Amino acid sequence: MNMMEMGEVVAYLLRYRTAERVPSGGRKRRAARDGQLSERDVCALIDDAQESEREALRDFLAGQGMRLKVFEAGDYPGIAPGSRFFALLPDPELEQPPLYTRDAVFEALKLRQESRAELALWYLQLWLLLHTLIYTRLNRALSDVSRYQEATFVTRELVELVRDQLEILRGLGERAPENSRVLLDERGEDIPRRVKAFIDLLVRAGHLDLVRESGDEDVWQQTLLGALEAEQIGVHHLTHLIELTSAEGSDGERLLAQTPDAEAAHQPSGEETPPPSDAQAQQPDAEQTPQPSAAEQQGAATGAEDDAPRAEEDEEPRA
């Protein structure tokens, strides 16, 4: 792997975050795009790289706070026999760049002329409630990565959970945190629109997949990448949004700590890390927010096992 090929591999991983020798779930391999390698070529380059080249790749990614992890069939459900699953994950030992830029969140969630702080609060609220569905509801800890295929929900469930949460908040009246009352200004179809925009963000990030359509409802499932990332860094990638709520005069930490049903959303995940649905986990101070309990567990090491090529017609472009 020369320096040009290494740059192409990194560009691919930054776009898709994962690559598979044999794609799971019936997905076709991603074909080459203008200026970008195919998924098959990326896997081959990583597999065939010499140790010195892999070390250079690791150093390159570490400068961006990332780490390339490699998993074999049998490490987690959903990895096909004879395949390898390459995942670009944030390194919990390094300073974390934002998973999403602020502008992407603002553009996706904005319906009218909401302030940046209000949009950040909406994102954090939606994130908490989604993780209530895919962790707390399943009595699942962050370290339960292997159960990611159980973490399914339909859009309606998240919409209803948001509405229920806002009704609880509304019922608190004057006892509700003052800054959280901006969440009660929704009208008409605001909640379904925000939920759809939020889900679209997570799909673009590779954290959710559409697995099937049930009647007139879409069924979403957490991806292996999303489960691995939750285990590795928990809520640390959200600090740029939490800090924004404080920077613009809204006490984000206090709001999240007093979110209605925060205690009901609590799910222990070992002595080191609270669950993603625990509102108190949203502390921007790393010393107050411990790392996930399984953060130091490593996936299978990289190797140079050969894979039989698959037909080019199996590939398809991915937007």
Image: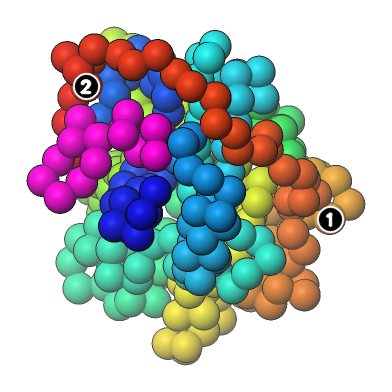
Three-letter amino acid code at disc 2? Glu
Three-letter amino acid code at disc 1? Glu
Taking the image as drawn, is residue 166 in sight? Answer: no
Q: Nearer the viewer, residue 135 or 15?
A: 15
The span picked out in magenta is 31-45
The percent position of residue 26, horizontal first and vertical second, equals 35, 13
Taking the image as drawn, is residue 225 in sight? Answer: yes
Q: What label sits on residue 272 in the rendered view?
A: 1
**Residue at which label 2 appears:** 315
Residue projecting furthest to the left: 34
Q: Residues within 10 Å of mark 2 (few under 14, many from 20)?
A: some
Residue 20, compared with residue 285, is above or below; it is above
Residue at the spot x=69%, y=77% of the render?
285
Residue at the spot x=35%, y=71% of the render?
102
Mark 1: secondary structure? loop
The percent position of residue 67, horizontal first and vertical second, equals 56, 55
Q: Nearer the viewer, residue 235 or 261?
A: 235
| Residue 151, picture quadrant | top right
Q: N-terminal of the two: label 2 or label 1?
A: 1
Q: Magenta stretch: residue 221 in it?
A: no
Q: Is residue 165 left or right of residue 44?
A: right
Residue at the spot x=44%, y=18% of the render?
307
The percent position of residue 158, horizontal first and vertical second, equals 44, 37
Q: Nearer the viewer, residue 193 or 70?
A: 70
Cα distance between the residues tagged 2 and 1: 42 Å
Mark 2: secondary structure? strand
